[in-house]
Amino acid sequence: MSRQTWKQDQGSEEVPDLKQRLEEIQASLGLSSSDLCQRLQLLQLDAADLQVFECHLPLIDRLQQACMDALLTHLAPFERLNGVLNRVEQQNGLKQQQLRYFGQLVRGPFDMQYARLRVLYGIQHERNGVDLKWYLGAYHFYLDYMHEALNAHFSDQPTLARQLYRSLRRAVFFDMSLAVDTYSAASRMALEDSEARYQRAVQGANDGLWEWHVDDDRLTVSPRWQDMLGLDAATVPRTLDAWAARMPEAQQQSFLAAVTAHLEGRQAFLHLECQIRDRWGQLIWVLIRGLVSRDQHGERLLAGSQTDISQRKQAERELMHATLHDPLTGLPNRERMNELLLQALQRQAKPGARYAAVLFIDLDRFKLINDSLGHQVGDQVLVQVATRIERCLRPGDHLCRFGGDEFVVLLDDMAHAEDAERVAQRIMHGMQYPLIASGNRLNISASIGVAPLNGHDAEQDALREADLALYRAKAYGKSQLALFNASLQQEVHQRLKLETALGDALGKGEFELFYQPIVEVGAGRSRVVGVEALLRWWQGEKMIGPDEFIPILEETGDIVKVGDWVLQQACAQVREWQEHGLPGLRCSVNLSSRQLLEKNFAGRVAEVLAATGLPPKSLVLEITESLLMQDGPETLATMRELESTGVRIALDDFGTGFSSLGYLHRYPLHIIKIDKSFISQAPDDERLKAISRAVIGLGKGLSMDVIAEGIETSEQMDFLSGEGCNLVQGYWFSRPQSASDLKPLLLSLSQAGPHSGVAPSPISVTTVGRPDPLR
């Protein structure tokens, strides 16, 4: 077999790796031409031996083939080789490879290339996990078998048999020396690689290594351990106690206890984070790990590593600070305030504790700053506000940013309970002075809720109580202060109960529409021209006033679906009345701003009118001045779309809000309703009489209908008649009533009829079954 053929038999992917490994092992062995000559001389192996083989090659090949069959039979019982020898294809491959190897053994030449090939065989066997004992055992079997075979074949030529065997033994020992050296070099190089990897790992991990001989209390440390603390040979600790002495006193006991627990088997290993002083007295955080074992003399040895974790600890501190502090103001955040409150409550439970309280602070109309000047300016305002509040506090008080424009103050260890209110007043006073943010001069105010901490109630939610007080303060207006009391909690519970019930009211059919007539009077006669639909809510036999539940519907957004129901019911009812004797009757329905801002609201109104058959001119939608104050393009577009369908729009409670003549010019309005607060006292109050007269004149001048609300007395009717206001609504004619109760009155007022004097007589209507509802 040629060397070229042998090369082709090797896997193409392994050749570059084997070549590199061959060069490494050859260098490790010092295998050179001179070394090769030395090996051959030592074994007395030369060309004469190859000449002996050459004369008998066919015979030797046959004997070697028989030897190989016998070797495989000999190795079969060994379990270590069963995985290879039990597979026929692998067994045949191994047999052919070994025969080629035997063929080269007797053909030579024993030069450098031969030696390199022999080393390669050794590398392959070593990589395949073939231990050296199997390698040497195969050589022994081969020599023993060939010795007997040659003697048997040349029994009549013992000298030739001895000569052939002697040459064969020299060649085998030459191969064996190369195999043994190859295995040794591979093992040595593997150990060197392992040690090098270990050194790189230790250096890369930046760990200091230590060993403590337990029985004689002797500590040795690595140079990296010393460098970590800036120590030298004279200052490095030599005992466990000397090591512990470099730790803070509180941590010394923890360290020694952890070592003892591990030595006694109560902990599987030593693992401890602690601080240790360096050469300059600075404390650094280290992680100490270790494991006890016994050395070659049977003595206990606790060994491990020490890692500098100062950077990790610093990162943990920064992360903890970020977790518990607001990034904008640097103040403690909500989570930290909860911790402080819990600690304060625990202190309050102890005898002799002084007073403590929580202030909940909310900036008034802060959203306006963000919306108009941007969040960057808003952030500057928050930072300056935080500084102002801190100036009003004592050392030991705590201020946190609770979120958005809300702040919470914890006042602890106060001499008097009233001190909390005084601090709140001081904070509000500190807000009175304008501040400058990005060149803008801004006036800031705050509302504050105050809640005392009760030491007898460990479960007290002081933040919730202060928030309830803040809610009450906000209800009073800007820059207000409110104190928590038990009634606030009851009000919240009642409101929650009401809100929950209100969410189910529509589905349970608890809503009902009441109607109040709108009457046209003049020339001593009166007739009904319309009704205003008013929503009522029944809980059993109890009626909930609209002032209680309408604001809740607005806040929750349920006013949209409830308002849609009101519109549907009112239009259907008025259409029914039109078809049964009241053909010209109009229907007035109050609108919420949320409804008007709904997408395609005008289209929804058109659908209701089409479904109920009510003519668009018979529908009046009433809006308030607060809705017009939003002055959005969507609102204006929707109102103009409604007007284009024939629906009329009324401005309700005119004069009670931020009245502006611009509304009357800008928006498509057809009716002005004068609030009853002007009419009720107008006959006796010259100023109110002048205002009412001006509004009536304004409506006439703009060709708008004017309806006066809340008419209850003949004096009011006389005044309105004198001013030419002929559309009125109020108790003088009827309270709001259910559709069934009101129908007789509507029929009686549907025809113009005479009345005595200037004002018509009041009409008395008794409601049946339920009490008279309030307007």
Image: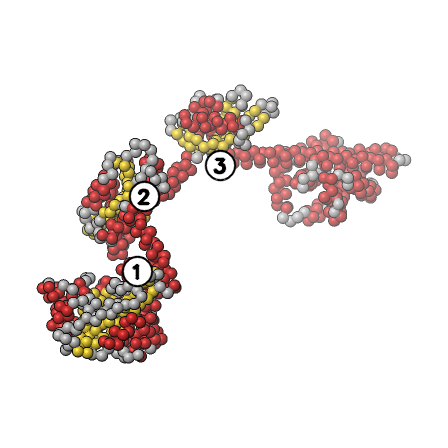
Label 1 or label 3, whichever lies nearer to me, is 1
Q: Secondary structure at mark 2?
A: helix
Q: Is residue 775 left or right of residue 504?
A: left
Label 2 or label 1, whichever lies nearer to me, is 1
Q: Amino acid at mark 2?
A: Ala
Q: Secondary structure at mark 3?
A: helix
**Residue furthest out toward the left:** 686
Q: Earlier in the sequence, mark 1 or mark 3?
A: 3
Q: Identify the residue at image location x=27%, y=46%.
A: 484
Name the disc covering residue 462, or none.
2
Q: Amino acid at mark 3?
A: Gly
- Say above or below: 760 vs 460: below
- Residue named by callout 1: 544
Label 2 or label 3, whichever lies nearer to me, is 2
Q: Secondary structure at mark 1?
A: strand
Q: Are marks 1 and 3 in contact (CB under 8 Å)?
A: no
Closest to the observer, 129 or 519: 519
- Say above or below: 277 vs 695: above
- Residue named by callout 3: 204
Residue 473 in the image: state x and y as whole percent: 24, 50
